[in-house]
Image: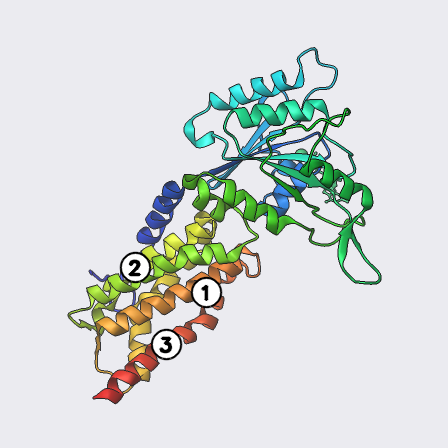
Amino acid sequence: MAKKNADRPDLDDKAFVQATSEARSRYGRFNLAIVGASGVGKSSLVNAVFGRDWAKVGRGLPVTRGVQFYSDDSLGIWDVEGFEIGSPVPPDQQLRNHLDAIAAHSGDHQISVVWYCVKANDDRLTPADIAMIRELDARGLPVILVLTKVDWIKNPLTGHQGVAKDVEAFVDWLNDPVDEAGARLRIPYRRVILTSTRDKHGKGKGHGLGDLVTETLALAPERDKDAFRIAQRLNLPWKREMARPIIATASAAAAGAATVPLPVSDALTLAPIQLTMMGRIAAIYDLEVKTMLSAGALAQFGVQVAGRALATSFLKLIPGAGVVVNAAVAGALTAATGESWMKICELLHTGKIDVRKLDQEWAKYAPSFMDVARKLVERRVGRK
Ligand SMILES: Nc1nc2c(ncn2[C@@H]2O[C@H](COP(=O)(O)OP(=O)(O)O)[C@@H](O)[C@H]2O)c(=O)[nH]1
Ligand SMILES: [Mg+2]
């Protein structure tokens, strides 16, 4: 790789940026339709599960009366306000019109899963609800019946969390719905999930949201599952599961690039491999690359990660390691870099660190991968 001068290696962030945008377009977008009367708690749910407060910022694109579409790279939300009371158009026809309007949009706007939201203190579904759920199902859309604003009550004797009797009765009805005459009703929602986003004092983290994301993933069409894993913010293990194969691939590629041991001065050959890996992982954590770049941290960061400075200090630390980066070192270094970067991405994603402090944070993690590589070299030296 060409160098501008000895101290400032010609390392740029193209590989990172390109890898992120390729990964984003490969994973695509998860589109959720969230249906329910105004005030049931739709925006609060979206905010709790996806960490986006769109309703407040009002970036929504009004599609037709009663339907809004909010979107970014990984997530689209069709916010559907139930039906208009007093309209001469029956509710299921209103919904049919909404769904036709949605269907007229391009493929990357199409609905994956529907959350049909009803307040837990209602006591049954209305005929309008039932007609609308049937309409959604008839279109092949998987519907989750989400009970919102469930109050969780701690039993003073057992300490168990439970719900009020009337909510329990509603859930029983939902599990086996019957009409006024006691005849069985078929209402094609696929799951019933009890949720809250806060307690009745407006505090706490909510309830049932983990179940909601698990069941949403289960019902999502296969091709949309990864996009959902990326868009949601509650389940970090899913993201780790997606990142680990990327780390393994990059480590193998780095080892492959160093089958002929690289002089230390050429260790930067590994940089594009590592930056590509990091870019892909950033996409999984749904990190705004633009924000990261504006901090100017990334290129700097790449130098620390894969650059000569590191390779040199690393080798200085280990007398007798020689002046080459061999396949095992390259592989281990890349694997450890990937793991460290994944942790940092988690911290950025969960808002535990500020993107502007990226380089400082990295310094905290860097020794852990130095240790990995050092152990590896010690083993190799020991064996001789
Ligand atoms: N007690 C309680 N209040 C909630 C809950 N979720 C939302 N709210 C409140 O209900 C109101 C309407 O919520 P919002 O999410 O805007 O409903 P939307 O109109 O369906 O989008 C707001 O004042 C929220 O603070 C919940 O789980 N429990
Ligand atoms: Mg709203």
- The residue wearing badge 1 is 359
Residue 220 position within the rendered picture, expressed as x and y whole percent measured from the top left: 49, 40
Give the spatial CA distance, label 1 vs label 3.
20 Å
- Marks 3 and 2 in Cβ contact (< 8 Å): no
Judged by depth in the image, the label closer to the viewer, 1 or 2, is 2
View quadrant of ligand 2: top right
172 sits left or right of 334 in the view:
right
Residue at label 2?
A: 249
Q: Residues within 10 Å of mark 1 (few under 14, many from 20)?
A: some
Within 10 Å of disc 3 (Cα), the crowding (few <14, some 14-19, many 20+) is some
Three-letter amino acid code of the residue under disc 2: Thr
Quarter of the figure with residue 4 = bottom left
Number of marks: 3
- Within the image, what quadrant is residue 306 found in? bottom left
How far apart are labels 1 and 2 at the CA level? Answer: 25 Å
- In the figure, is residue 308 to the left or right of 159? left
Instruction: Establish if 310 lies above or below 284.
Output: below
Answer few, some or many: residues within 10 Å of disc 2's Cα (few below 14, many 20 plus, some between 14 and 19): some
Query: In the rendered image, which residue does mark 3 sit on?
Result: 372
- Residue drawn at x 68%, y 36% as measured from the top left: 176
**Residue type pointed to by label 1:** Asp
Front in this rendered view, residue 81 or 306: 81
